């Protein structure tokens, strides 16, 4: 007569181990995947054993832990990006992810906030209406830029996609796949948005000072964003020399600008046709 014994897989400080299961013990059935488990979390899908009924307290608790804790969530991620961006992104890609706000969610939150503030305080930065706007390149870009002002998250997405393609092609020998480059550049875009939010009062004052000040701000901000890219990439691709990293970053930035301009031209044609 065969005798079968059941075992529980229990997580402890020394790792996961198994022990005999007795009928006296009450196992938890996961509400997410119906797997039976012992402990505070399902060892199959990660669902918490204790799922509270949804209530206003649940929403407040979720906001508190997701947004306002400095040891995890959005503020922790922002702090890490402002102090050690490349190292932080590399750690995230290598699996150190629990404390971080997810990259795409971070960009959506920051881009939405920046878009609202920009639309309310800045409006149209370059208040120029080119002649025969539908038939010249400047007019096409002007229409596209105005559309992006009202849909700022799309502008962030275009930069992310352009930078991802560029860095993947330029840094291909470093061994990272396309999705990992996407994560890298999504967090890079998050860093840009954080800096842009910090500098928004400067942009507001430069706009009030006239178009020349606005153009100067735009030029300086582009140089700043290149500097942020180099800082980020130099830490992330830390096996390269500083000189080589700078050269490849410059090539990435140039290629990204060309791709973004191409996308902008095509999208401008589409926006113009829809108006």
Image: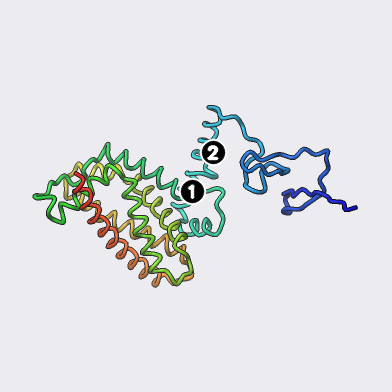
Marked residue nearer the N-terminal end (2 or 1): 2
Residue under label 2: 65
- Residue 57 at x, y = what percent? 55, 28
Residue at screen point 56% across, 30% down: 54
- Residue 1 at x, y = what percent? 90, 52
- Residue 94 at x, y = what percent? 55, 59
Question: In terms of depth relative to the viewer, which is nearer, 171 or 216?
Answer: 171
Residue at the outermost right position:
1
Q: Is residue 267 left or right of residue 186?
A: left
Question: Above or below — where is 51 with respect to 148?
Answer: above
Residue at screen point 38% across, 53% down: 189
Residue under label 1: 102
- The reply to whether dot 2 and dot 1 touch (C-beta < 8 Å) is no
Question: In terms of depth relative to the viewer, which is nearer, 236 or 146?
Answer: 146
Q: Nearer the viewer, mark 2 or mark 1?
A: 1
Q: Name the quarter where the C terminus is drawn.
A: top left
Choose top left, top right, bottom left or bottom right for residue 223. Answer: bottom left
Choose top left, top right, bottom left or bottom right for residue 25. Answer: top right
Q: Secondary structure at mark 1?
A: loop
Gap between marks 2 and 1 measured at Cα: 14 Å
């Amino acid at each position: 007569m065969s005798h079968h014994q059941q075992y529980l897989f229990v997580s402890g400080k020394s790792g996961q181990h198994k022990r005999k299961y007795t009928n006296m013990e009450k196992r938890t059935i996961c509400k997410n995947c119906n797997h039976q488990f012992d402990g505070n979390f399902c060892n199959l899908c990660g669902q918490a054993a204790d799922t509270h009924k949804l209530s206003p307290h649940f929403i407040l608790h979720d906001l508190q832990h997701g947004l306002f804790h400095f040891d995890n969530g959005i503020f922790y991620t922002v702090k890490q990006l402002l102090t050690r961006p490349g190292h932080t992104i590399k750690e995230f890609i290598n699996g150190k992810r629990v404390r971080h706000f997810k990259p795409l969610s971070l960009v959506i939150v920051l881009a939405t906030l920046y878009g609202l503030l920009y639309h309310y305080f800045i409006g149209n930065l370059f208040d120029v209406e080119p002649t025969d706007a539908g038939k010249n390149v400047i007019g096409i870009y002007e229409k596209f830029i105005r559309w992006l002002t009202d849909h700022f998250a799309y502008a962030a997405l275009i930069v992310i996609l352009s930078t991802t393609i560029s860095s993947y092609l330029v840094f291909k020998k470093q061994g990272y796949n396309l999705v990992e480059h996407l994560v890298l550049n999504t967090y890079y875009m998050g860093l840009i948005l954080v800096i842009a939010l910090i500098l928004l009062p400067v942009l507001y004052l430069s706009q009030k000072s006239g178009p020349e000040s606005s153009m100067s701000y735009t030029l300086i901000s582009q140089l700043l964003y290149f500097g942020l890219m180099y800082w980020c990439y130099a830490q992330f691709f830390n096996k390269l020399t500083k000189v080589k990293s700078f050269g490849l970053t410059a090539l990435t930035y140039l290629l990204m600008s060309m791709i973004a301009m191409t996308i902008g031209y095509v999208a401008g044609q589409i926006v113009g046709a829809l108006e």
